[in-house]
Amino acid sequence: MLWLKNVQIVDPAQDLAAVRDILVKDARIFEISVTFQEEEVQAKAEGETLEVLDGEGRLLFPGLIDVHTHLREPGQEEKEDIASGAQAAVRGGFTSVLAMANTKPVIDQRALVEFVRAQGERAGLARVYPVAAVTKGMQGQELVEMMDLAAGGAVGFSDDGHGIQNAEVMRLALEYAKLSCLPIISHCEDDALAAKGVMHKGLVSARLGLKGIPSCAESVMVARDLMLAEETSGVLHLAHISCRQSVDLIRQAKKKGLNVTAEVNPHHLIFCDEDVQLTKTSLKVNPPLRTADDREALLEALLEGTIDMLATDHAPHTWEEKARPFAEAPFGINGLETSLAAVWHYLIAPGILSVKRLLEAWSLAPARRFGLAGGSLKPGQRADMVLFDPDRTLEIKIENLASKAQNTPFLHTKLQGCPVMTWVGGRLVANRE
Amino acid sequence: MLWQRKHILGLENLSKEEISHILQTAKPMKEVLLRPLKKLPTLRGKSVMHLFYEASTRTRTSFETAGKILGADTASIAVAQSSVSKGESLLDTAKTIAAMKVDLVVIRHAASGAAAFLAEYLQAGIINAGDGQHEHPTQALLDMFTMQEEFGDLTGKKVVIIGDILHSRVARSNAWGLTKMGAEVTLVGPPTLLPPEMKALGVKMSHNLDGELEGADVVMALRLQLERQQSGLFPSLREYSRLYGISSQKLKKTGRKTIVLHPGPMNRGVEISSELADSPMAKIEEQVTNGVAVRMALIYLLAGGTSNVMA
Ligand SMILES: [Zn+2]
């Protein structure tokens, strides 16, 4: 049994934000109290060895759940594999991750879904939940066997990496997926409008001579998908929302009561297109970093709940792939190990975002939307939890990263606030002490 | 002034003093160029590598000529456009060049930022000979040199740049450079090739050529990439030429002695009429000569020539 004393527990699910003692037994949260007596705890342990930890000055969160990661296995293990990604996750404070289906091969059959789950279990770190493709081979044409994939453990469907260009295919997907009750996760990008751009279309792209991706490449498809969700009563989750126009559309849709949720990536809240430089490929990401005004709209939407979730869109790439001229480097930011610290540093420490909202958006809402264990520290819940030190500085160095890739814009910087210990099912899986 | 810079990646970050210094240095270079015996010992023992990822006989020949007159050893790696994606990465090429210990690398590449990329990975000085749609500083410098030959000081001179501004590195470099030199720049083109975000360059923009010609000292026509029509950026060459092509007839509207520039190669009858291209108003051949002089100046400044240029 674990007895964690004097720790500031923040758990929006039970409206708790106070210094407490917490007991963990048999992989689950056993009891939370203002304080426990030694004899009392011994009795509750019923002969189990008792481990005592003082959490003074630290915070305890329900483990973070990241609904958008690319773990690259099978097929691109030079960038990342499920074990290294899961290791990066727990070091970053994430106890569960959703693994996107755009691997090689694409996760579009039950055996592949089961493979991803099995690799996650073998690694024994973060819980790894597979997202299956919407269409076979992500070709945007024929639907996958959604019910079989759901039975194999898929928690959602997404052709993430591409938008589904054919509106009828998207409509059918939303319609058919109702059988499974699982969300369709939409990567909203109209290929013709995006026109092979490499950064946000605006003043900075004009100055740098880089091909731009206009905001409408996203918002046009957000509008389409919301209309289709309305017509089908489908379950829709919008990935990586990046611009004000999309936010406005989602706000309206929620007013109408549509079954829609949306996520935002930390980099879209921290950076904007003005940070992009020709040689800074670590900021090349899709959707692109948009304007300061878009960033403001995203933040506002996250605070008010129009945007439900934070998600990393962890997209590891090798150093060589990113060491190219901007237009030739792949899109993607490595996020699992740095995102919580970065959000703390840039948004929580300055008082822009509350810890409560952070945990609603990065733990509770994801658990509810995708029907996952975790999201709360209520007694009886599986003990997926993170001990966080708000004062400790995390220095981002290549040798500190568990991910196989280093494509983070925070490389060689220091971030204030650092996850120090992570437990999954009561088992300590990451420890920076 | 004392020259400090190691690379010429673009004009956006150059000061007026630096640009003036380059143009000033190009003057004696042009005198050398006009001599019957064109050879200086200035850069003997220095090596210049030309790395051209886009076919451009003109620019490459201009650089090679400039280097040879100054006595530098020049070598070229021409990479066929089609093999770029399959071939070795720019990073690997950079490592190879680093191993050859060259003093100066001249690069032309289809990706914006390719020159800055090399500057990060190489010890050698880098001259950007055109990177994607970003900058083409030597072209803008030779354009400004040509204008100065005609007008002297460029302060208050009205320069109209016409065409596919969005995709033009020549327009970007000229906008930065000319603004610093005090000229008044107007960019002209159809809305699809001159979208609102081009205001990032901080100069006047217009879609109406006829309305902008009055008082123009310099009119520069950009080369139109004909394949832009297939991307739907303009409906036809006929309509483009009618709206944005220049001719002696149209240039009467300037009401003064205007010079006409074009970075070449020209699409005669599209962005510029044949009769105008061959008229005395056009300084297009002068631009080619001045290109060698300006490139000599840059190679001289960056490769750190020791002996006196005037010698
Ligand atoms: Zn995506």
Image (cartoon, coloured by chain):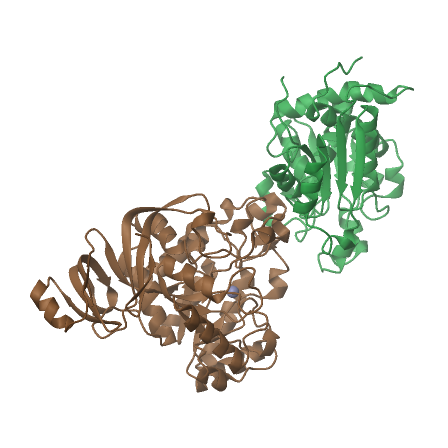
Chain colours: A brown, B green
Q: Which residue is drawn at 80% across and 38% down?
A: B76
Q: Quadrant of residue B252?
A: top right
Where is A192 relative to A58, above or below?
below
Q: Position of residue B47 (x, y in %)?
A: 76, 29
Residue A419 visible in image: yes
Q: Who is closer to the viewer here, B310 or B270? A: B310
User: Which residue is rendered at x = 50% and y = 71% of the image?
Assistant: A186
**Residue B204: percent from the left, percent from the top?**
62, 39
Expressed as whole percent of the image width and height from the top left, the position of residue A414 reads: 39, 44
| Towards the viewer: A364 or B152 | A364
Task: State the count of labels.
Answer: 0
Tell me the quadrant of the picture where the N terminus of chain A can be found: bottom left
A263 with respect to A76 (left or right): left
Determine the residue located farthest toward the right in the rendered image: B36
Image quarter for residue B201? top right
Residue A184 visible in the snapshot: no
A108 w.r.t. B106: above or below: below
Q: Which of A190 and A400 is in front in this view?
A: A400
Q: In this view, does A104 lie to the left or right of A365?
A: right
- Residue A394 relative to residue B224: left or right: left
Picture coordinates of residue B105 (x, y %)?
72, 35
Q: Does A169 sit left or right of B131 as displayed? A: left
